Amino acid sequence: MAASEKNENSHRVVIVGGGFGGLNVARYLRRAPVQVTLVDRRNFHLFQPLLYQVASGELSPANIAAPLRNILERQPNCEVLMGEVIGFDVANRRVTLNGGSIPYDTLVVAAGAGHSYFGHPEWEPFAPSLKTIEDAIEIRGRVFSAFEMAEREADQAPRPELLNFVIVGGGPTGVELAGALADIARYALKREFRRINPANSHIVLVEAGDRLLAAFPPELSTKAQASLEQLGVRVHLKTMVTSIAADHVMLQSGDQTQRLPTRTVIWAAGVAASPLAKKLAEATGATLDRAGRIAVEADLSLSGHPEIFVIGDMADYTQSNGKSLPGVAPVAIQQGRFVARLIDARQRGKTLPMFRYRELGNLATIGRSAAVADFGRVRLSGFVAWILWLFVHLMNIVNFRNRVLVFVQWGWNYLTYERSARLITGREARRAMERRSE
Amino acid sequence: MAASEKNENSHRVVIVGGGFGGLNVARYLRRAPVQVTLVDRRNFHLFQPLLYQVASGELSPANIAAPLRNILERQPNCEVLMGEVIGFDVANRRVTLNGGSIPYDTLVVAAGAGHSYFGHPEWEPFAPSLKTIEDAIEIRGRVFSAFEMAEREADQAPRPELLNFVIVGGGPTGVELAGALADIARYALKREFRRINPANSHIVLVEAGDRLLAAFPPELSTKAQASLEQLGVRVHLKTMVTSIAADHVMLQSGDQTQRLPTRTVIWAAGVAASPLAKKLAEATGATLDRAGRIAVEADLSLSGHPEIFVIGDMADYTQSNGKSLPGVAPVAIQQGRFVARLIDARQRGKTLPMFRYRELGNLATIGRSAAVADFGRVRLSGFVAWILWLFVHLMNIVNFRNRVLVFVQWGWNYLTYERSARLITGREARRAMERRSE
């Protein structure tokens, strides 16, 4: 099973997960005297920050994905396995796969996070979250087929739930998605329907806290909200979702409850670490935080297990100022690079100073030409921040081909206002047909 | 339900299907004094001749699809409905939808064709055909996950079925797909695996007839076969598939039978017209041919029903030379344009000469730099034919954006040999994981 068994003498590093964290460990180990095996359930690395653009029909899935084998093909000390990790045999230093196991000398677990429905798993079918390509395709189908159904049934009984879109959670994903949906309703579909006016649809963004983008300074939260409202998005702050069904959500704000008819709800709220965190905690005695993240030491290893590292969205890393690092790409990337350097240093009998996160800044975009950017003392909003957002994201896409494809499509979408990648496929296409007979 | 009811006085044309035929009817009616409703189950027009490139990871689905509403948005006399047609009420001139009906004065049915498993529907789960975007994504997943599984299980018991790929049917789809798979095995995956050599996989093309590309002159069939064999494809002529299961196919050639272990079978053989042909035949008394196509008059209308036209893959149109037209895009396009002009002429009290198909030529590509082209007296093969194939297909893609995206990707794929759109998603991704425990 294990590649590393090929070379009996070299140190075997197994990386679980090919996201920002795991991929950076593998890449930064390219000159280290180790045998690397990267295991992922998928055959590609996904550039998650742009996933919402797949959901909104701006980009195709393959534009934000790069095959892991292809990224790592020129790295002879690294092999890629597509497989599902189901547990850890820490005593024997083996990773258990669905149908086999792999030995390791050093283990790096970077399996990321999924969404948490706050103890309401029954909401998931009505309110998909946006973590995988399948999620994005499903949400894209739901959004665009809602307009199709509204057009088809325009002269039957009114169905207000069709053109109400509710996004739960006012973090970056929720804000970016709300802006993208507002662009679709106001511009992209403008001339295309004959019986409905897509601009009459309602995009509702629900946030439990008292401002959007809680990770940003309050002044930028205010600007983001103003930009969204200018696009017609209705922002409900201090508002909780108390139930979600096929044709409505219940909102609660203070003592007030409201029933909002809607067929399209997108969940961009709670985050929960991969269930592998719990398995690893059970195997090592490590502790989990409320989000299911596993507590790591200052060098990102587990207490009592210097040979096991946890990084990225799965790791609960407390900085010297007492604050825990957020689950964002720059954290995972920096942690991945640190762990790779540390593994390399250990092999060479050297030491490294402990991990320290270098805050690079925070960006979020709002619709077709606004964004907010926070670089500590420098704070930007509006068009300049938007250009910066475009540039940063374009430069971080993994391969050159995708950079060109994304650039061409962004240019096209910006100039024409179109959303051409808006296929309604798979389950959602069938569902739209079945709904007809209601 | 019907848009056409908005304008009581105008002639209502309902078009069923937004493929090459139906879309051309709608477009060529843009200046006609009629109200057009185009009904399709999907919200996009699909450029089917390039579908095999989605299956082989060269292009993304959205690159060969264009939203029907977007194509027709500037045509005020035309509306698009996403809906499923389930029957025809010819007496009352209404099309029955899944949940409603639409009145017509003139009906054009262009619902295309699917695949026929020659009375063996039980083969379908093991041998998907290539008609829809979902099919292409499914086949892409099966092809690339076969390599992943082979790599993962390289040091367990040998599983020859993983790296045998069988394509059933030696028409253009089968030939183009075989060439594309050979390119993947020989070039695209060359450096990416550590335990298997993808070049050792076997691409087998099975054809019941005595040559490939039966619609081409025999000399080009021979050249196509030679090009494929040069790429390592094994071509079995005069060979029938007698059974298909999860891990093998049975082939029969004369008295010889052969069991070929394989997990990946692609069905590119029999064609059957949409089941709507049968419904329409029952409603009008028209006759069906062996492929389920409906017999049409010289003006493409149904006998006794001058107000109903059938075009494209659904129509059995016999030319003056006694030959029936094949189910290819140029036939559907020319028939669509003819019907639109005829409807327009009738409205203006004019007549038109009967439909006559203008043979434009026949093209098929074989791998990364060969093709065959038949223009009657002029016959080309090799690199020149391939360049021509590229040019013709690029120019026929519906919108400019997709033309640019396809061009960029073809250039990239040609120069780098890569297949970057090779995501394993959805059902196939789950299946690959489940297989692990076998």
Image (cartoon, coloured by chain):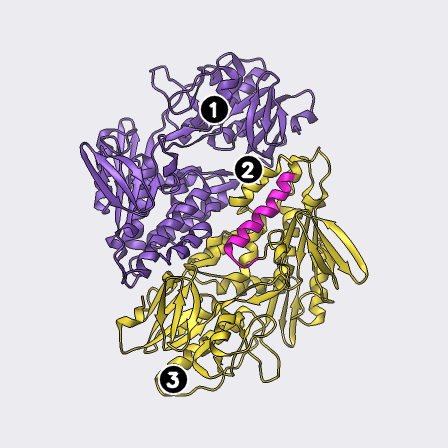
Chain colours: A yellow, B purple
Q: At 60% across and 67% down in the image, what residue appears?
A: A363
Report the quarter where the C terminus of chain B lies.
bottom left
Measuring from the top left, give residue A417's x and y in whole percent.
60, 48
Question: Callout 2: few (<14), some (14-19), or many (20+) C-alpha neighbours within 10 Å?
Answer: many
| Residue that numbered label 2 is attached to | B68
| Residue that numbered label 1 is attached to | B277
Q: Chain of mark 2?
A: B
**Residue at the extreme right of the image, as rendered:** A255
- Looking at the picture, tell me which residue is in the foreground, A254 or B402: A254
Give the answer, above or below, for where A92 lies relative to B41.
Answer: below
Q: At 26% across and 76% down in the image, what residue appears?
A: A8
Measuring from the top left, give residue A331's x and y in whole percent.
53, 73
Residues marked 1 and 2 touching at CB (< 8 Å): no
Q: Main secondary structure of the magenta part?
A: helix
Q: Amino acid at mark 2?
A: Leu
Q: Amino acid at mark 3?
A: Arg
Residues marked 3 and 1 touching at CB (< 8 Å): no
| Residue that numbered label 3 is attached to | A346
